[in-house]
Image (cartoon, helix red, strand yellow):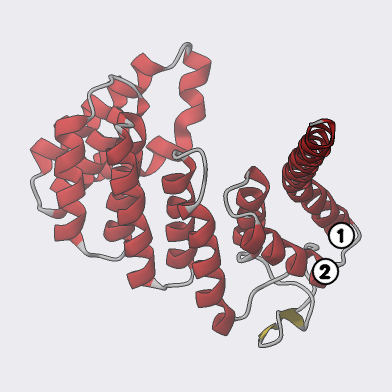
């Protein structure tokens, strides 16, 4: 009887030790998993500060591949996105099969054309896996703007639509309207006026905040009406936009700071009469 009790006691102790070992292993793993992205991102920042662009890019890709749901992966995606718009050093290598060319400028690196699809896919992977769902359409919007900047129009439109749909699924009214405004400007800039007007019509029926966004929507409607040679209606829209701008600002001094928004509009207004 005593032997059985002693045997059961030993088995119980072994089971307890095993459970403790499992718990400790899991804890260490979770701690490592939570710390590793932070450590990687810190190292990326140091490498960029020291102009070690190759190492920074390699670590950024590693971070996005291994920890796509983290804030640090998102930040790395933004870093790479920003670098698209600058030239930099030569011979940046992405893995073993991708390369980048450029000339040193403004302490940044550039991505070669043949690498873009791979990096777009990787950044989209990060977007899809974000724990905080609002960052998914935010990243898609950034990817759309990056693709548009490189005249990758099909890809830009795909990312823009993913962003718009993402904001709609989350019920984020402000961001839905902001995305529609981005699409309006994008299609207008490409002289695809009919498609642009679809987004304009949406905005005219959904934006009524009495603030700058509504002012911008009416200004764009004025531009659209000028294009259609409906000058009196356009003038009415410009006047409304101007009133909304004035109402949304807290002082006369602030009203002088909207030249970047109003200059082209009032010039068009002046051209009408």
| Residue furthest front as drawn | 1
Residue on which the image places disc 2: 55
Q: Considering only vertical position in the picture, is 210 above or below 158?
A: above
Res 68 seen here: yes
Task: Compute the Cα span from label 1 to label 2.
Answer: 7 Å
Are the two marked residues, 1 and 2, in contact with CB atoms closer than 8 angstroms? Answer: yes
For residue 191, what is the image quadrant? bottom left
Residue 116, how many percent across, how many down?
A: 54, 75
Give neighbour class at mark 1: few <14, some 14-19, many 20+ (Cα, 10 Å).
some
Residue 48, how many percent across, how many down?
A: 83, 59
Question: Which residue is more in the foreground, 243 or 91?
Answer: 91
Residue 141, how many percent across, how many down?
A: 43, 51
Q: Is residue 82 left or right of residue 204?
A: right
Q: In the drawing, what numbered circle is on residue 47? A: 1
Q: Residue at x 61, y 56 (%)?
A: 77
Q: Considering only vertical position in the picture, is 200 above or below 58?
A: above
Q: Residue at x 22, y 46 (%)?
A: 223
Q: Residue at x 48, y 11 (%)?
A: 251
Question: Which residue is more in the foreground, 78 or 24?
Answer: 24
Residue 82, how many percent across, how many down?
A: 63, 58
Q: Residue at x 30, y 21 (%)?
A: 244
| Residue furthest bottom as drawn | 97
| Residue furthest top as drawn | 250
Q: Considering only vertical position in the picture, is 192 above or below 227?
A: below
Q: Is residue 142 left or right of residue 99?
A: left
For residue 62, what is the image quadrant? bottom right
């Amino acid at each position: 009887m005593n032997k059985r009790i002693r045997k059961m006691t030993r088995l119980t102790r072994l089971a307890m030790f095993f459970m403790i070992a499992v718990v400790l292993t899991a804890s260490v793993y979770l701690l490592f998993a939570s710390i590793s992205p932070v450590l990687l991102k810190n190292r990326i920042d140091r490498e960029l500060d020291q102009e070690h662009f190759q190492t920074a890019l390699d670590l950024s890709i590693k971070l996005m591949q291994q920890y796509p749901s983290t804030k640090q992966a998102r930040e790395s995606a933004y870093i790479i996105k920003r670098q698209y718009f600058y030239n930099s050093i030569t011979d940046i290598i992405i893995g073993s099969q991708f390369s980048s060319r450029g000339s040193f400028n403004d302490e940044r690196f550039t991505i070669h054309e043949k690498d873009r699809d791979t990096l777009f896919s990787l950044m989209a992977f990060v977007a899809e896996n974000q724990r905080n769902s609002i960052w998914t359409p935010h990243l898609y919007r950034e990817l759309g703007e990056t693709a548009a900047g490189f005249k990758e129009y099909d890809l830009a439109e795909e990312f823009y639509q993913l962003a718009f749909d993402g904001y709609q699924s989350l019920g984020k009214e402000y961001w839905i309207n902001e995305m529609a405004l981005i699409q309006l400007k994008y299609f207008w800039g490409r002289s695809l006026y009919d498609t642009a007007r679809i987004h304009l019509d949406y905005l005219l029926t959904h934006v009524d905040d009495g603030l700058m966004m509504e002012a911008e929507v009416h200004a764009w409607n004025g531009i659209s009406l000028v294009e259609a040679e409906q000058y009196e209606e356009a003038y009415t829209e410009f006047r409304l936009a101007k009133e909304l701008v004035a109402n949304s600002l807290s002082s006369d001094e602030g009203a002088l700071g909207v030249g970047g928004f109003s200059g082209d509009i009032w010039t068009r207004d002046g051209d009408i009469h």
